[in-house]
Image (cartoon, grey):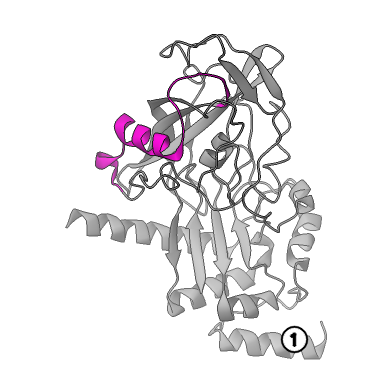
């Protein structure tokens, strides 16, 4: 079986299509005509459309494997960054968390003003500029929610799946979940909406994906988690299968998610000739791990 | 490319229903494809027939799904 995955989303799963036998034949013919299009799975840069992820199983994996084609690879219009070859491709075991650096006094900022911090409220945080935990073998299988929870499930997690109150990931844009649905899902997973001790801080937004033509809008969600550079806020995030990072779409450090650039237009490419805009514009809210929890077990 | 490998590739592609011309210099050892691509084009974008095939396929699928939702 050959599965084509259009790599766009951050929180939700990407759209995927299994090729029919006839379609598979056509794709293989085009592929073997020029195998130089095959890119490592993780070879996606921080800018531009990510292109496609191709998954091969069964007879197609066997056949194309004998031509030197991996079982999962990327086809993208982005320039090739050879440094990605150094990244190990074997996923790590699920259920591990990045080490947490410590805690500090944590005065409220514009992301937290809606909650009155208690005297004991403090921030647990990880590195603001070392994302090696996420940007190797864990990159492809952990989304923004895994990064937010500081818990690598290696299973592309969603709010509420662990707590039994999942957000409706298949909802149409017009029926997308809002504050109530997300809050119910997050609290079912164990997140808190107030601070009573040392905790991770995350903020969630829902976004709109608008295509130039062809397609009606879709929704997605995205999370940012607060870290620190000294005493300066550094909100960090991991957009879907891409690297965890500390900058917004404009390339600026994120001292406030509310004022960060959360919108980007991706122009048409030769492999996906439909331009699209991602805009995370609907603020859901700020959530915290329970006191003393430096990661949250999610699913 | 050895005659043995060339024959094996022809058989494999035939089994997959592929009749298009295949370049004689195709690499046959697993993972060498990517290594060769790194050597050939670091820092460069590359366009091949697979890009065109995917562009046609995915846009068609999106149109079909759009039409399906509209009904």
Image-based side of A107 in relation to A228, left or right: left
Residue B32 vs residue A94, the one in the foreground: A94
Q: Where is residue B44? Give x, y as percent.
A: 71, 48
Is residue B50 placed above or below A272 in the rendered structure? below
Q: Which corner quadrant of the image does residue A244 belong to? A: top right
Residue corresponding to mark 1: B6
Counting every numbered tag in the picture gives: 1
Name the side, left or right, on which A213 lies relative to A150: left
Whether residue A244 is visible to the viewer of this picture, yes or no, is yes
Rendered location of residue A133, percent (x, y)? 71, 41
Q: Nearer the viewer, residue A78 or B49?
A: A78
| Badge 1: residue crowd in 10 Å (few <14, some 14–19, many ≥20) | some
Identify the residue at horizontal 31%, vertical 38% (top origin).
A177
Q: Which residues are magenta?
A: A171-200
Q: Is residue A198 magenta?
A: yes
Q: Is residue A177 magenta?
A: yes
Q: Quadrant of residue A130?
A: top right
Residue A249 seen in the figure: no
The percent coordinates of residue A202 (x first, y second) are 51, 27
Name the subunit of mark 1. Answer: B
């Amino acid at each position: 079986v050959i599965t084509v995955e259009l790599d766009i989303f951050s929180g939700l799963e990407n759209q995927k299509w299994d090729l029919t036998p006839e379609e598979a034949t056509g794709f293989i013919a085009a592929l073997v005509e020029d195998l130089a299009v095959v890119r490592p799975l993780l070879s996606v840069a921080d800018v531009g459309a990510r292109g496609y992820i191709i998954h091969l199983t069964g007879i197609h994996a066997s056949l194309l494997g004998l031509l030197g084609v991996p079982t999962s690879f990327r086809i993208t219009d982005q320039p090739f960054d050879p440094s990605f070859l150094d990244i190990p491709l074997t996923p790590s075991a699920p259920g591990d968390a990045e080490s947490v650096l410590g805690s500090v006094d944590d005065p409220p900022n514009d992301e937290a003003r809606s909650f009155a911090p208690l005297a004991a409220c403090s921030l647990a945080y990880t590195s603001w500029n070392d994302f090696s935990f996420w940007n190797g073998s864990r990159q492809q299988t952990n989304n923004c929610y895994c990064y937010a929870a500081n818990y690598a499930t290696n299973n592309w997690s969603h709010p509420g799946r662990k707590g039994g109150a999942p957000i409706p990931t298949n909802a149409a844009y017009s029926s997308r979940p809002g504050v109530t649905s997300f809050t119910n899902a997050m609290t079912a997973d164990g997140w808190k909406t107030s601070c009573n001790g040392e905790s991770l801080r995350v903020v969630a937004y829902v976004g709109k994906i608008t295509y130039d033509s062809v397609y009606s809008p879709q929704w997605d969600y995205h999370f940012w988690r607060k870290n620190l550079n000294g005493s300066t806020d550094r909100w960090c995030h991991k957009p879907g299968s891409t690297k965890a990072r500390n900058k917004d779409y404009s390339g600026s450090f994120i001292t406030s998610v509310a004022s960060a650039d959360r919108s980007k237009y991706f122009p048409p490419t030769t492999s996906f000739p439909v331009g699209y805009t991602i805009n995370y514009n609907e603020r859901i809210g700020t959530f915290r791990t329970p006191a003393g929890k430096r990661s949250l077990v999610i699913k | 490319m050895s005659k043995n490998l060339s024959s094996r590739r022809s058989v494999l592609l035939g089994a997959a229903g592929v009749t298009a011309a295949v370049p004689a210099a195709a690499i046959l050892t697993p993972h060498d494809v990517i290594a060769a691509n790194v050597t050939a084009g670091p820092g460069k974008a590359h366009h091949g027939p697979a890009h065109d095939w995917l562009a046609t396929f995915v846009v068609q699928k999106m149109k079909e799904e759009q039409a399906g939702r509209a009904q």
